Image: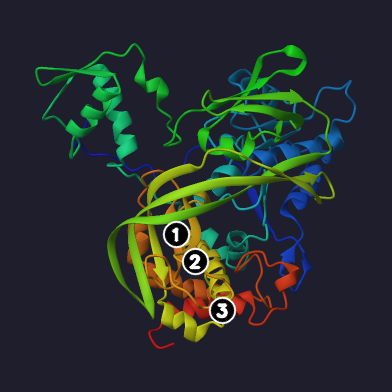
Amino acid sequence: MIGAPVTAITRSGAPRGAREVLFWNPPVVNPDLGIRAPAQSESQAIAKLLVQSGFKTLVFANSRLLVEVITKYLKDEFDADPRRAPRIRAYRGGYLPTERREIERAMRTGEIDGLVSTSALELGVDIGALDATVLNAYPGSIAGTWQRIGRAGRRQQKSLAVLVAGSDALDQYLMRKPEFFRDASPEQARIAPNHALILLDHIRCAAFELPFQTDDRFGDQATAPFLEVLTECGVLHREAGSFHWISEDYPAQAVNLRAVADGNFVVVDITGGRQNIIAEVDYSAAALTLYEGAIYLVQSEPFQVERLDWVGRKAFVQRTTVDYYTDAIDYSKLKVLAEFDARPSGAGLCGHGEVHVVRRVTEYKTIRYYTHENIGYGPINLPDQEMHTTAVWWRLPADVLQQQFASREQALDGFLSAAFATRIVATFRMMAEGRDLARAVGHRDETGNPGDWVGVTRAGEQFAPTLYLYDNYPGGIGLSDPLFADARHVISEARQLVGACACASGCPACVGPVASAVERQQPSRKDLALRTLGLLLTTTP
């Protein structure tokens, strides 16, 4: 009953045994570049040891591709004999419901010794008693980490959880400050109640139940503009000030509770003339996994994408036997549509507003199993993905850049490196998941030579690189507003993160991967990042 007294439930009563949580930082293999042994190979080795020791083990990976790759390696160890039932399985979004239910059943009954999964198994699915969990890299949130750790030891038996860190700055931040993880509360559940796309889906479902009147409100929002859109789409009919549902569809079936964009792709196996649907892929991931020539993995079995019907949302694949997998390469371009607010930031400016993001997937690389060598590239020809969202950005005036950097190339390197560190700090300060916040660096001069300072843009503006942090969802999810309010602390902590890193010239833990060709350049990527962040903090260069 709304308004009645309530009792807060602050402790879990679920049965749980003793638990050991280990943070494992792989050894450094290149001290100059700050590169560590791959988290993937370390996770595989730990999982292999656990399974061999008789522990029921669940391995978590942060992408569907990694799930399939780790599954293949573990299957090569434990499932080499085709006459025996598989001991290792993969579990992720995109598998058909019947296959996922079968994997859950096999795990509950003890038929499977090792399971490799994405966040699909973080919570909500009973898979029986587990002894150990292995996390291949930091999941991106405190809540997600505890949910994954908590999958083992649910029947009062002792359990083990191992978080294997990658070279990524988020992971290394936790390795340097494990007390942050120990003491931090889980992330707040962020909602954007007036998000236009989400609100439109709510109103569509509500209209199915009862007609709307022209002056009705949904929460604190007027519904008239949304009702007009739905009328134009042919799902509502307006009559005498009322809007009635006229579509034959049930609207709730088309509402995705986990994503803003809709329109899943189905993967159709056409091997030997068949037409079998073997998986589904959500819209946001389709461009990165279903391009023509891609190797799409199902239970580590490779299928090659022969044809992609983008309009019809279908990918046609054939079973193949290859010793490599594929990984797409993409980049983003931003344009400011509206500036909500702005304030000085050191010698530059910090802005907040609405942006238009264009994401283009340009090519893919083929990577050989075990050696991880890049053995080739292929082109990708797909439509650009566009969205409007909100962002915070930082910019330095051209005269400051010319005083502090010898060339445009140096200035861009400084902004790219600063963007990497800034996103890491912003993700933690906003208590967001890693995928919620994206970074980009753009500049308004697209015609000049990046090696000198001569020239202005067509609009008469001088070269001005810009560091963007934007909500990685259509319409935004409410991160940019508090980030703008906290902008100075974000820049200050990003500078501290880069300055405190033990590397000599920049590494994946502070400014992002540094190619060996630029390892010894002077000034280094690390120096350029510190200079850029310093300029955004102080008004006197």
Q: CA distance from mark 3 to mark 2?
A: 23 Å
Q: Amino acid at mark 1?
A: Leu
| Residues tagged 2 and 1 counted as in contact (Cβ below 8 A) | yes
Residue 431 position within the rendered picture, expressed as x and y whole percent measured from the top left: 44, 56
Name the front one of labels 2 and 1. Answer: 1
Which residue lies under the disc numbered 3?
Answer: 407
Q: Earlier in the sequence, mark 3 or mark 2?
A: 3
Q: Quadrant of residue 450?
A: bottom right
Residue 422 is labelled as 2
Q: Amino acid at mark 3?
A: Ser
Q: Residues within 10 Å of mark 2 (few under 14, many from 20)?
A: many
Q: Quadrant of residue 95?
A: top right
Residue 107 is labelled as none
| Residue at 64%, 29% in the rendered image | 128
Relative placement, left or right, of 120 versus 241 is right
Name the front one of labels 3 and 2. Answer: 3
Disc 3 is placed on an element classified as loop
Q: Amino acid at mark 2?
A: Thr
| Residue at 27%, 18% in the rendered image | 208
Relative placement, left or right, of 487 versus 282 is left
Which residue lies under the disc numbered 1?
Answer: 469
Disc 1 is placed on an element classified as strand
374 shown above or below 99: below
Residue 434 position within the rendered picture, expressed as x and y whole percent measured from the top left: 52, 52
